[in-house]
Amino acid sequence: MEKGISEIWGRAELDEGQSTEVYRAMRSLLCATCGTVIAEGMLFTRRKVKGIGLSIMPQCPKCAPFTLQADRKERSALLQSLLIEQPADSSPEADSQAQAKAKSVDEEVQRRLGPALKRSRHRRK
């Protein structure tokens, strides 16, 4: 499988004062303005193609100087908890608690849906 060209690294402010996306090269690229090689792992920006409006033309930091912005986003507690690797609880006590919880859930489902399931089975026969 072929490597991607780049990945979004973050946001930056250009010397002109505009805000833009900053990319990290995943393979060698050429700057669309000056032709300099943008090495793998190097940060760069993209400029718009005239007439199309899509920012796809890579520009090296010499042609489009930028200052990285600090990441201002606060990650939600839910997202943070999902991203943090949870320790594997393999203790017998934890296993028995999980089994007891599963059993109580099964019993509750049976209690609520049991009568309806019995009626539907009798109708099929």
Image (cartoon, helix red, strand yellow):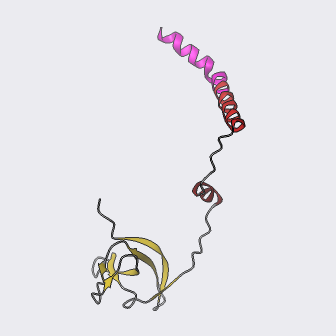
Secondary structure predominantly adopted by residues drawn in magenta: helix
Q: Is residue 30 left or right of residue 20?
A: left
Q: Residue at x 62, y 46 (%)?
A: 88
Q: Quadrant of residue 49?
A: bottom left
Q: Is residue 103 above or below residue 50?
A: above
Q: Residue at x 39, y 88 (%)?
A: 64
- Comparing 70 with 97, the one in front is 97
Q: Quadrant of residue 117?
A: top right
Whole-percent x, y for residue 83 in the image: 57, 57
Whole-percent x, y for residue 17 in the image: 49, 89
The answer to whether residue 94 is magenta is: no
The answer to whether residue 115 is magenta is: yes
The extreme top residue here reads 125
Q: Is residue 16 above or below residue 105?
A: below
Whole-percent x, y for residue 105 in the image: 66, 30
The extreme front residue here reads 91
Q: Which residues are magenta?
A: 108-125
Q: Quadrant of the N terminus?
A: bottom left
Whole-percent x, y for residue 34 in the image: 29, 90
Q: Is residue 74 left or right of residue 63?
A: right
Q: Residue at x 53, y 16 (%)?
A: 120
